[in-house]
Image (cartoon, rainbow, N blue to C red):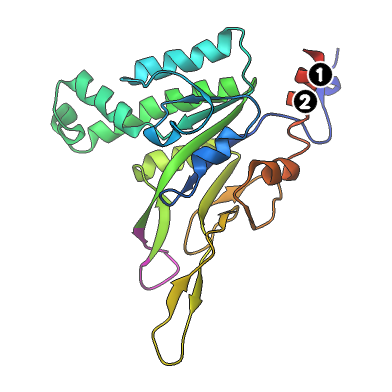
């Protein structure tokens, strides 16, 4: 058989691999709780009021990887997994334990070697999640921080929202995800007569799917630039990708 016979065309239905990060209390965990048959890994206290399945709180990156591999290899009822929130503290703890040091900066006599070792563990984690993504939707939940950003095309730095983990680790996560969604409360500047503008809003929660100077985001699905922070809306924008999960439910 010719290798040319293996060529395929058209869109390939697959499960979603997305990162949702945003400001405190915006509702990232709530969004993930509305995914199909979800299970939470590393759930924070903020998810205690959500009616979801969850693994016990993990104490090490080894325990977390064991939970992921159980979902890979064992029969279960879940269609989505949410990693809440990103697990950098566990990774740094593993590096410190391995090097028998108190801080990641002390690993292997310093010079940034601890952060390099942490990237190895990040790659392992993302590889295991990618394997799991063949079977389930994978959603990573992260927090945002405001950091100074130096655009090489501009003469001065400016502030922007970025993922609250090490910059190089954040780059690995962004590369692995099909969508990086920045969530926030919708705000407007209101000016009353001669007073300084004040921020106002109705508490609407939105997510951005494309990068702008003020935040980092991306998507591979041709989604609208801004959407409600709502799984049903996001699902409609990715209906082709969800076909595989729907077929599995019908066959089951």
Looking at the rendering, in which quadrant would you find the C terminus?
top right
Q: CA distance from mark 1 to mark 2?
A: 6 Å
Vertical arrangement, residue 132 with respect to residue 23, above or below: above
Mark 2, residues whose alpha carbon is within 10 Å: few (<14), some, or many (≥20)? some
Question: Residue 13: horizontal and vertical position, in percent?
Answer: 76, 30
Residue 246: image tag: 2
The residue that appears at 22% across and 19% down in the rendered structure is 98
In the visual, does 93 lie left or right of 161?
A: left
Can residue 160 be seen in this snapshot? yes
Q: Which residue is mark 1?
A: 250
Residue located at (47% from left, 30% from top): 83
Does 120 appear above or below 171?
above
Q: Above or below — where is 64 with respect to 196? A: above
Against 220, is 95 above or below? Answer: above
Residue at the farthest top position:
74
What residue appears at the point 40 percent right and 19 percent down from the top-left corner?
Answer: 64
Helix, strand or loop: magenta stretch: loop
Span colored in magenta? 147-158
Q: Is 194 in the magenta?
A: no
The answer to whether any part of residue 117 appears in the image is no
Circles 1, 2 touching at the beta carbon (< 8 Å): yes
221 with respect to 70 (left or right)? right
Q: Position of residue 213 (x, y in %)?
A: 48, 64
Q: Position of residue 165 (x, y in %)?
A: 35, 42
Which percent across, then down, holds residue 72? 56, 13
Which image quarter is the N terminus in? Answer: top right
Looking at the rendered structure, the secondary structure element under dot 1 is helix
Q: Which residue is at 18% across, 29% downward? A: 107
């Amino acid at each position: 058989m010719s290798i040319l016979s293996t060529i395929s065309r058209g869109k390939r239905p697959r499960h979603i691999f997305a990162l949702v990060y945003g400001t405190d209390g915006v509702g990232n965990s709530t969004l993930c709780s509305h995914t199909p048959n979800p299970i939470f890994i590393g759930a924070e206290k903020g998810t205690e009021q959500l009616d979801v399945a969850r693994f016990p709180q993990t104490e090490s990156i080894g325990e977390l990887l064991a939970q992921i591999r159980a979902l890979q290899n064992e029969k279960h009822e879940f269609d989505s997994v949410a990693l809440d929130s990103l697990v950098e503290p566990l990774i740094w703890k593993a590096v410190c334990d391995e090097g028998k040091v108190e801080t990641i900066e002390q690993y292997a006599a310093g010079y940034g070697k601890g952060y390099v070792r942490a990237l190895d563990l990040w790659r392992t984690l993302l590889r295991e999640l990618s394997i799991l993504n063949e079977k389930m939707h994978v959603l990573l939940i992260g927090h945002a921080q405001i950091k100074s950003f130096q655009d090489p095309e501009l003469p001065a730095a400016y502030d922007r929202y970025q993922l609250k983990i090490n910059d190089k680790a954040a780059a690995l996560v962004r590369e692995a995800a099909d969508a990086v969604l920045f969530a926030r409360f919708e705000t407007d500047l209101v000016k009353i007569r001669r007073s300084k503008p004040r921020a106002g809003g109705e508490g609407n929660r939105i997510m951005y799917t494309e990068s702008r100077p003020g935040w980092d985001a991306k998507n591979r699905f041709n989604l609208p630039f801004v959407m409600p922070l709502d799984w049903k809306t996001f699902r409609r924008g990715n209906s082709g990708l969800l076909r595989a999960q729907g077929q599995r439910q019908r066959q089951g």
